[in-house]
Image (spheres, helix red, strand yellow):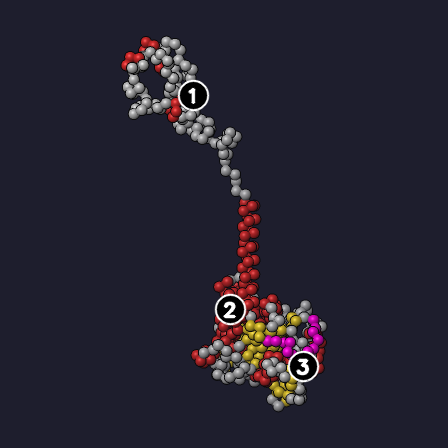
Amino acid sequence: MNDWPEGWTGDDRGPRYGRGSTGAEPEGARVMRQVRRGPSPRRGQGPYGRPGGQGPAAPPHGVPRQPSYVDGGQGPAYAGDGQGYDSGYNTGQVYGRPAGDHGGPGAGGSRGPRPAPNWGRRIKWTAITVVAVVAVTSVATYFWADSKLRREVDLSTVIERPEPGKGTNYLIVGSDSREGMSAEDKKKLHTGSAEGKRTDSMMILHVGDNGDTLISLPRDSDVEIPSFRGAESGKLYPATGRHTKLNAAYAEDGPALLVRTIEYNTGLRIDHYVEIGFAGFANIVDAVGGVEITIDKPFKDKWSGADFQAGKQTLNGEEALAFVRTRHAFAASDLQRTKNQQKFLSALAHQVATPGTVLNPFKLYPTLGAGLDSLIVDKDMSLWDLASMFWAMKGVSGGDGTSMNMPISGSVGGNLVWDKAKLKTLVNELKNDEKVTVTGD
C-alpha cells in the first residue's frame, strides 16, 4: 500500500533531487555536514514551505524538510527564513577564510605578508660555513702534505754536537742525485750519468728575530774530517786530521757526516737538514710556472747547458737547473755559482710563497706534490718548520735579511780556506741571534 499522497512514490519524485536525478540540488542532508536545518513546516504548508494548495499535501506522518543548496547564496535555502548556504568557492571563503578576506594583516587565522629576509642571519651562517670548509680543507691538506715528506736523515747519529743557540739553523743541500730520472731526462737536463750522490750546493739558513741570514758554503771549501759514527754501520771512526773538500764528506758517509763536519769546523749547531736532487728541483720550478729572475751578464756553459742573455726573464725547470749548476763560465767558478744559487733559490721561495700560488689549488697542490716528493729532510722536521724556512728565504730575497758567502781568506791545494777571524764573529752573532755584521765574498 502506498502511503504517499496522490500517488507520489519514492521512485517518482520529479526532477527535484534524489537517486538518479540530474538536478543541481544535493541528494539529502547527508551530503554535507555543515548544512543547517530550518524549523518544521507549519500546518497547511507543503514540502519546501509551499502552500498546501500549490503542491502536494504533507504526508500523514510528515516529511523531513530538505535543505536547499544554493550556490553563491543566490536564493533562499528555506522559504520564509531568507538564509542560504554558500560553499564559499565563489566568494573567496576557502578553508575558513571569511568572504572578502584576502589575507590582509590582522585577518583571523590567515597568513600575513611574508617577512623580509634576515640578511644578518644569512650572512652569519654563510660565513660560518665558509670558515668550516676552509678549516677542514686546510687540516686535510696539512696532513696530506706532512705525510709526503721523506724523513730519512737521522741527526741523532751525529756525535759531539755544539750547544744549541738562539734561532733555528737549516742546512740546505742541493745534490746531484739522478734518482727517478730516465736516460732522456738526464740528456735533457745535462746531468750526466754519474753513480752515487755528491753535493752541488750547501747553504746555512739562520732564521731568527733579528733578521734571517743565508750563507753559502763553497763545495771546494777546505775542511777537516772529524771523528764520526757511521750512519749505517754505527761504527766509530776516529779523527786523523785529514783535510779535504767539503763535498767529499757527503760523498764519504752521507748527510750525517756532512752535518758533523760543518758543525766541527764552524762550531754552529745544525737544527734541520733539507736536501733536493736535480729532478725535484726542476719539477718544483715547472710546477709554479717558472721563476722570474734578472741575469746581470750573459753567459754560456756547454757542461750545464746554460745559454742566457742579460735581463729579466722567466726560467723553466731545465733552464733553472742549468743556471744554478754553471761554474765553468765564471773566473771565480765556485763563488759565483753560490751567488747564483742563492739568488735563484730566494726567487723560487718568493714565487712559491706568493698568494697566486698559495691560494690557487691548481698551483699549490702540484707544487707541494712535486716539492715534497723530492725533498729529503731530517726525522724531526715538521711541515711548519719547512714553511718557516721558505718564508725566511722569501724575506732574504725581499731585502729583509742578509745573503752572503762564507768569508774566504785564501786557498790551499785548490781548496778555499775560510777566514777564521770573520768566521768566529759570524758564528757568535748567529748563536746569539744578533744582526750579522760580517760580510763575505
Give the percent coordinates (x, y) of residue 404: 63, 77
Residue at image mark 2: 369
What's drawn in magenta, residue-wise? 153-166
Kindly identify which numbered label has been placed on residue 264.
3
For image coordinates 35% across by 12% down, the residue present is 60
Whether residue 91 is visible here, answered yes or no, is no
Q: Quadrant of the C terminus?
A: bottom right
Q: Main secondary structure of the magenta part?
A: loop
Label 1 crowd (10 A; few <14 / some 14-19 / many >=20): some
Kindly identify which numbered label has been placed on residue 246.
none
Label 3 crowd (10 A; few <14 / some 14-19 / many >=20): many
Q: Secondary structure at mark 1?
A: loop
For image coordinates 48% across by 81% down, the residue present is 190
Residue at image mark 1: 36
Give the percent coordinates (x, y) of residue 114: 50, 38
Are dots 2 and 1 in contact, CB under 8 Å? no
Find out whether residue 37 is within the magenta segment.
no
What is the C-alpha distance between the residues marked 3 and 2? 35 Å
Give the percent coordinates (x, y) of residue 141: 54, 63
Are dots 1 and 3 in contact, CB under 8 Å? no
Find out whether residue 160 is within the magenta segment.
yes
For image coordinates 59% across by 81% down, the residue present is 232
- Looking at the rendered image, the disc whose residue lies closer to the viewer, 2 or 1, is 1
